[in-house]
Image (cartoon, rainbow, N blue to C red):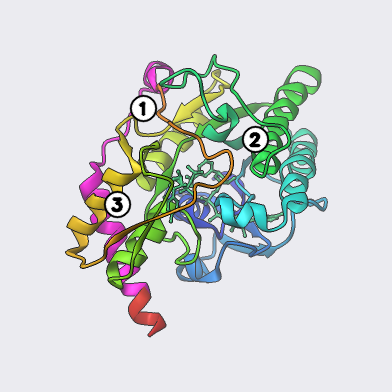
Amino acid sequence: MKRILITGGAGFIGSHLCEKLLNDGNDVICLDNFFTGSKDNIRHLIGNKNFELVRHDITKEYFAEVDEIYNLACPASPVAYQYNPIKTIKTCVMGTLNMLGLAKRCKARILQASTSEIYGNPSIHPQQESYWGNVNPIGIRSCYDEGKRCAETLMMDYHRQNNVDTRIIRIFNTYGPNMDINDGRVVSNFIVQALQNKDITIYGDGSQTRSFCYVSDLIDGMVKMMNNISFIGPVNLGNPSERTILDFAKLIIELTNSKSKIVFKPLPQDDPVKRKPDISLAKEKLGWKPNVDIKEGLSKTIEYFDAKLKEVK
Ligand code: NAD
Ligand code: UDP
């Protein structure tokens, strides 16, 4: 039995990871400051003898004896990470430093949840890990993009200088149950709007693209990466099936049988024009590829939000 620390464990991805690692027979410490996460996401795990919930902020030191650390703590939605940008960069930099210090002391393996955002507004398409990115260092997304880039630098320097056993994954847009209803990301916004027959808000003309991965596929890749003996990454994890945001809005309307109309709002500054992962490296090194079809994944997500909206009423 391994003792595993999951920072950001009460968030969307973290809560699925807590469940998976507990089901695999591990002892799990879920650490969260509940900024964007919720106890609702992990309430069903409280009481499990192998599960421990800790309210803590990773910008402060944390001491425990652990074998593995999944460092997920960080708001991921642009609305959430821009709410307090200085806190976002502190979480990325000071938080990752604290977790690397913990990994070094415990000789634990540490996996950093990095992001496709480190590629910025990419000039190479699809994005390969060898691409260094095109990031605005002074824009409104920089607190997250540059914060995550610095976290990758810290991971590599602790690896080279202190032999810390590091892993880096670059997550592309992931969706599924346990996303927050007010999260502000496109999947939750469109589904919640469609279920309420409210206007679907497209930012810009909807020609920008994204590639959406269902959460169970991502979790599978994440755990494979942590368990890989020698490959430290970085590795892209995402679904290469790319679509425009306009087509995505139409798909949500179709799947929810909604009467919603599409409306167009201003495009936020530095919104990437296109995004699609090249997953050749994940296939080669991890034997991983996503399997869940978009309609199947969205149906499960719609069911989740439908139930949540009924709870709120
Ligand atoms: P989320 O906002 O649902 O989860 C983040 C969790 O971290 C929340 O529970 C939040 O309360 C917690 N947190 C934030 N700051 C903290 C701090 N200082 N100390 C302790 N806890 C803190 O987001 P998510 O989608 O589950 O993302 C999880 C991780 O994956 C993030 O690091 C994010 O950058 C990365 N990621 C996600 C996506 C995606 O599409 N979901 C894409 C790329 C990268
Ligand atoms: N978007 C949109 N309407 C919304 C929310 C988002 O058109 O209500 C767009 C956003 O401008 C971006 C894409 O959808 O082009 C994905 O946005 P999200 O916030 O989910 O994540 P990002 O990939 O930009 O980090």
| C-beta proximity under 8 Å, tags 1 and 2 | no
SS state under label 3: helix
Distance CA(mark 3)–CA(mark 1): 28 Å
What residue lies at 49% left-to-right and 29% top-to-bottom? 225
Vertically, is 243 above or below 14? above
Q: Amino acid at mark 2?
A: Ile
Q: Amino acid at mark 1?
A: Trp
Q: Is mark 3 within 8 Å of ligand 2?
A: yes
Looking at the image, residue 75 sits to the left or right of residue 244; the answer is right
What residue lies at 50% left-to-right and 47% top-to-bottom? 267
Q: Position of residue 13 (x, y in %)?
A: 48, 51
Looking at the image, residue 200 sits to the left or right of residue 253; the answer is right
Distance CA(mark 1)–CA(mark 2): 20 Å
Q: Which mark is residue 288?
A: 1
Q: Which mark is residue 249?
A: 3
Q: Amino acid at mark 3?
A: Ala
